[in-house]
Amino acid sequence: MNKKKRMNKGQAALEYLTTYGWAMLAGVIAIGALGYFGFLSPTKLLPSNCNFGPQLECVEYRLVINGANARADLIFRNNFGKPINITAVGNDAAGTTTPALPLTIDAGVKQEIRINLSNPNDYSKGDKREAHITVRFQRADIDGSPTHNITGIVFTIVQDMP
């Protein structure tokens, strides 16, 4: 009788562990499937963003691709209170822009700049990607003014080039 009582306790413990083991295995498989199909991708959950600081405000932005070419289309607003000359762009950018540099932006004025990106293979349509862009500028109203750099990040969904 004593031996049978001990076997019942052992069987109950084994059934308890087995039941919860299967439940945990099902949970791990479900989380793995969600991750595999991209439902748990953090880049899809984060909002699109363009940040070059408050003085060189990024009003509108997009990342576009067309075959072997990728570019960032940005509209900047000059909030410095003085006109600036953008003299160069760099980092992820190939350095070629439309319109050509140097480019003067008057105080409070918006200006569209299209910047070719140096690694177009890193971008594919529909993916959310980020581009790090450094803008080199100086004050336009003073000859020989010092050069400054602003590094910004554009993080958005890559679109087809129009």
Image (cartoon, helix red, strand yellow):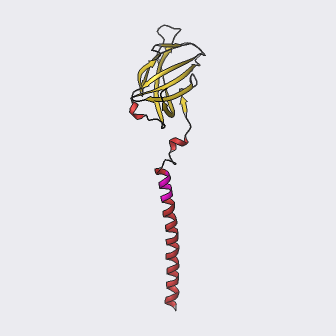
Q: Position of residue 103 (x, y in %)?
A: 49, 13
Quick check: 24 above or below 143? below
Q: Position of residue 8 (x, y in %)?
A: 52, 83
* Residue numbers of the magenta segment: 29-34
Report the front residue among 143 and 4.
Answer: 4
Q: How many numbered circles does the render carry?
A: 0
Report the front residue among 122 and 104.
Answer: 122
Question: Relative to 77, is 36 on the left or the right?
Answer: left
| Quadrant assignment, res 105 | top right
Taking the view exactly as shown, the residue that stands out farthest to the top is 143
Q: Position of residue 144 (x, y in %)?
A: 46, 9
Taking the view exactly as shown, the residue that stands out farthest to the front is 162
Quick check: 30 above or below 4? above
Q: Main secondary structure of the magenta part?
A: helix
Q: Is residue 30 magenta?
A: yes
Question: Relative to 32, is 60 on the left or the right?
Answer: right
State the residue at coordinates (46%, 31%).
131
State the residue at coordinates (52%, 81%).
9
